[in-house]
Amino acid sequence: MTDPIAEVVSLLRPSPSISKRVTGGGQWLVERREFGSPFYCAVVEGHCWMTITGREPMLLAAGDFVLVPDIFSFTMCSSDPPPRGALAQRLETSPGVFRLGDPDAPAEIKAMVGHCAFGSVDKALLVSLLPEVIHVHGEERLMMLVRMINDETRADRTAREMVLHRLLEVLLIEALRSTASAAAPPGLLRGMADPLLAPTLRRIHADPGRSMTVETLARDAAMSRSTFFDRFRRKLA
């Protein structure tokens, strides 16, 4: 059966746009406005704070991976951020390598940062099926994929663009896999993590034009109508 998560990633048509290595020391703050692009970050060493508009600040530490599929305003800053309105210190020390804050201060964080674009004309609808923020700790596969994207971006190898597109697709799928659990917010990922609902979601996705009722879906899932309806509502609504 077709996998809905794989289909969503494929239909989004992700393509990499920027990949860079970042270190920060002293007081520093970077701010992204809503006109930005989907963003991801893998923290290699150290820590920093990330605040997405409308959410509580998140501490990002070594081994953390964060993905923001939609376009939100957010800030990332040192433990002791500079005053708002202070002139940002940002220096490109070599192609794709940036230093934030005081260039003479010890590095408080080392991270790999990337931006991407979604080529689908229906990207707003597709992105609405994904979590607003994915924050994962300790998934080495994600860290490895970000390193590979970062390395491939700087190389001049054969089929470079194809490799980057494929790596980004795998990165998104791995990030979504890591989030697909009972702890995920209600939605497609949480439903796909439910062993009783996942087969039903695959059937719906494979043949959306088929006539379906709660009764037939419940029967296919070997549940009573009320049990199926309650489970479906809690996991996906």
Image (tube, rainbow, N blue to C red):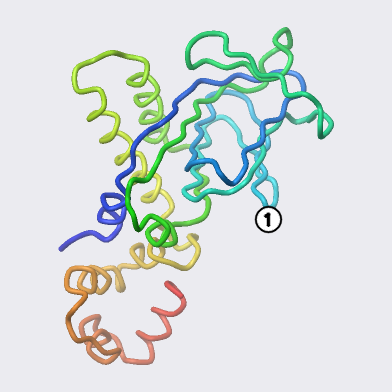
Residue neighbourhood size for the residue with mark 1, other residues' Cα within 10 Å, grouped as few (<14), some (14–19), many (≥20): few
Classify 172 as above or below 62. Answer: below
Image quadrant in which you'd find residue 156:
top left
Residue 189 location (% of width, % of height): 39, 61
Pick the quarter of the image with the N terminus.
bottom left
The location of residue 194, given as percent across then percent down, is 35, 67
Q: In this view, does 9 lie above or below 215?
A: above
Left or right, 172 with respect to 70, comes to: left
Percent x, y of residue 105: 73, 11
- The quarter of the displayed image where residue 217 is located: bottom left
Query: Label 1, on which residue?
Result: 54
Q: Position of residue 213 (x, y in %)?
A: 26, 89
Which residue is depicted at the point 30% across and 89% down?
A: 214
Looking at the image, residue 172 lies above or below residue 155: below
Front residue (pair 113, 177)? 113
Give the left or right position of residue 149, taking residue 92 as reference: left
Q: Would you identify the image quadrant in which residue 24 lies? A: top right
| Vertical order, 195 against 26 (above or below) | below
Q: Which residue is drawn at 67% across and 51% down?
A: 53
Q: Residue at x 36, y 31 (%)?
A: 145
Residue type highlighted by circle 1? Gly
Q: Is mark 1 on a helix, strand or loop?
A: loop
